Amino acid sequence: MKNGVIPGTLYVVSTPIGNIEDVTLRALRVLGHVAVIAAEDPQQTQALCERHDLRVPLTSYHNENKEEKTAVLLARLREGASVALVSDAGTPVIADPGRFLIREAVRAGIPIVPVPGPSAGLAALAISGLSGDRFLFQGTLPRASAALHRLLRTLREEPGTLVLLAPAGRLCKILQAVKEVLGDRAVVLAKDLTMSGEIVVRGQAGAVGRQLVRAPISGAVTLVIEGYRGKAGRNRLSTTRLRRRRVSGW
């Protein structure tokens, strides 16, 4: 064992979702002492490594090369090398590549250690004001309108808060579908959390959708939706204008 890194172990390491300072001391220690870092985009991970003076070889690991790279990484792990798996941002496997590698490592009896940290979905849920006692993370939504409506119908009576990932360009259609299928529920839209241009919008689905027509945004967003409350009524959130605020330390 070197600096707490165990040979032959796969480390699943969370990295910043925006603000590069949001990385744990343990994550830096592990990333600095593994034999290789398997990164969704090595160029993006290289920026984090350079910021913290981490001199470790990087290799790409994404959905297009996962089978080939899994074989290579498993061979390294069996030989006693330690490997860190990272995604472009946040926690690997949560709507990011890595599940195939982890599944095969489990089958091979290789130790897998989580190094927890940032997650866009959990960050958005935490500031939403909606219940965090029970929630359902749906991840990416279907592009086709009919498929989106079918999915939402399966979630209509889900009591937990819904956490969804969506491209900003489709948000108006998604919010309209939410209103039509789930009702005019309270929603919170979060984009670029932890960054200087952070955006948070709160309100009912219909009102937030109308606001986005007037003031469109781009990029990917996290959408948090109130869970089913039956006839008990809805948790109404006053609509907040699109706002950008500086985050100290960025």
Image (cartoon, rainbow, N blue to C red):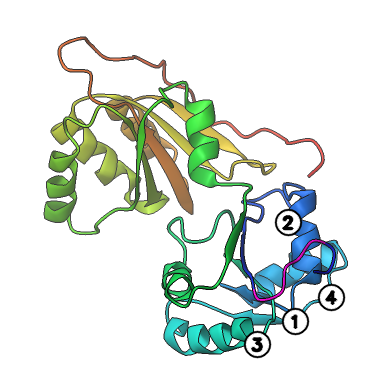
Q: At which x and y percent is residue 149?
A: 14, 46
Name the residue beneath numbered marker 4. 55
Name the residue beneath numbered marker 2. 27
Residue 6 is a magenta residue: yes
* First of labels 2, 3 by sequence position: 2
* First of labels 3, 4 by sequence position: 4
Please name which of the two marks, 1 or 3, marks the residue nearer to the observer. Answer: 3
Amino acid at circle 1: Pro
Vertical placement of 102 versus 205: above or below? below
Vertical placement of 143 versus 250: above or below? below
Label 3 packing within 10 angstroms: few (<14), some (14-19), many (20+): few
Tag 2 near tag 3, CB within 8 Å: no
Alpha carbons under labels 3 and 4: distance apart: 21 Å
Q: In the picture, which quadrant includes the N terminus?
A: bottom right
- Closer to us: 188 or 38: 38
Mark sitting on residue 79: 3
Q: In the picture, which quadrant includes the C terminus?
A: top right
**Residue 100 seen:** yes
Kind of element beneath mark 2: helix
- Closer to us: 224 or 78: 78
Q: Residue furthest right?
A: 53
Q: Which residues are magenta?
A: 4-8
Q: At which x and y percent is residue 95?
A: 42, 58
Kind of element beneath mark 4: loop
Tag 3 near tag 4, CB within 8 Å: no
Kind of element beneath mark 3: loop
Alpha carbons under labels 2 and 4: distance apart: 14 Å
User: Looking at the image, which residue is at 15% across and 55% down?
Assistant: 147
Alpha carbons under labels 1 and 4: distance apart: 7 Å
Label 1 packing within 10 angstroms: few (<14), some (14-19), many (20+): few
